[in-house]
Amino acid sequence: MSEFKTVRGMRDFLPQDARTLRYVEAKTREVAELYGYREIVTPVVESYELLTAKAGDEIRSRMFTFKDLGKRQVALRPEFTASIARIVATTLRNEPKPFRLFCAGSVYRYDEPQKGRYREFWQSDYEIVGSNSAEADVEIILLTHRLMRAVGLWRFAFKIGHIGVLRGILSQEGLDEKVQNSVMQLMDKKRYEDAFDLLTDGGISKRAADVLRSLIEIKGNSPFETVEKIEACVKGYEKSAEAAANLRKILRLVVDSGCNIDITVDAGFARGLEYYTGLIFEVYVPEMGTALGGGGRYDRLIELFGGEPTPATGVAHGLDRIMLALQGERADTQTLKRAVTIIPLKEELRSEALRISEMLRNAGTPVEIEVMGRKIAKALEDADRRGVSHVVIVGERELKENAVVVRNLAKREQVVVKIEKLAKALMD
């Protein structure tokens, strides 16, 4: 018989990893609630046309696509934003704005598997729809900062840019939007020379090329000094200057919020998705070399799906990568109570053990009952090996006094406890 394995790029989550994933996911929901985001659940399978409308060639080429039994071309979602845009343009089109919407779940891309990159992975997604204000962009940044802190991370930083700085120059040069998109894709991959070859073929002026070359060298962790350099560099390019001013306003609000955020401003920063129109950013752990999340402003996506022109901004966080970062920082994610194991010493005591277990569960204590028929020594050894904190031993002699034995496995201590006081004793 052949050995069955997971499909390449997919993986199983064993109990400890599953627990960490759910811990991180729970924190994303806590943050959503704190900021007033309402959760929606979108289909894993969407129409191919929807998902490719403004995804960018990179995402488009790595989607899981197939025809369903009705011969319709469909795909597994590679991200959440297109689905949210569809909902806003249709079901929610007449609802009062702004919307604050939240999603969490699995997404799929046919990437080359490597550490921190899988073909099935998990994201949390937050979108503010209906506001074109800098405050909305700032909220997305502050929310991301709070989430990183909430899960237990401390060594993380933000890279922030504005796609309008680059696009403003390309648009003023009359460069076709498709060529602009290809240039952004190449710049996102740091393939700058290939990008400039494409710009030269597109007929860009020498002056514009020089300005762009200067911009990709401008970066720094003194935000306002860096913005000053950007503003000086783009003089004469009206849209780029407006974008730089918008970036300055966003940064000022972030600083004034009182959050101590580690920020690098990068003028040549470009993200792979085509729909960005303004602020773009990523949050990352320097030691990892990969982003934990990213997002930005997309003001023209909703109308692409038949909605009214609607400004929007949002962010997606990679839960798998956050898990890796937590491992790197050895952060404590063990906020769930360890289950208590109940061991009846005799077969005829199992009913009493079940009654005690339900009493403890009603008090909010996770409980496991020894169901393998092991002798007490083996049962204690197994509980210790699995990291159980306490064992409740149900014995005939103690039951006559309406009591049980509680053994603390970490301290190797045990005491006799009255059953009515058991739940409280296990909490101490």
Image: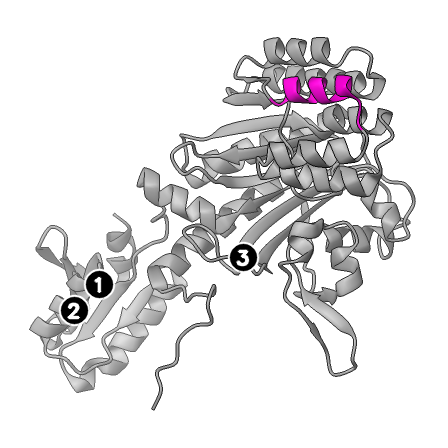
Residue in the image at 76% along x and 27% along y? 164
C-alpha span from label 3 to label 1? 35 Å
Task: Name the amino acid type tagged 1.
Answer: Arg
Nearer to us: label 3 or label 2: 3
Which mark is first along the chain, 1 or 3?
A: 3
Q: Which residue is mark 1?
A: 386
C-alpha span from label 3 to label 2? 40 Å
CA neighbours of label 3 inside 10 A, class few (<14), some (14 to 19), many (20+)? some
Residue 114: image quadrant is: bottom left
Asked if the stretch drawn in magenta spans residue 213, the answer is yes
Residue 255: image quadrant is: top right
Q: Which residue is mark 3?
A: 111
CA neighbours of label 2 inside 10 A, class few (<14), some (14 to 19), many (20+)? some
C-alpha span from label 2 to label 1? 6 Å
Front-most of residues 58 and 69: 58
Front-most of residues 392 and 71: 71
> Looking at the rendered structure, which numbered label has been put on residue 382?
2
Residue in the image at 71% along x and 8% along y? 232
Identify the secondary structure beneath mark 1. Answer: loop
**Tag 2–tag 1 contact (CB < 8 Å):** yes
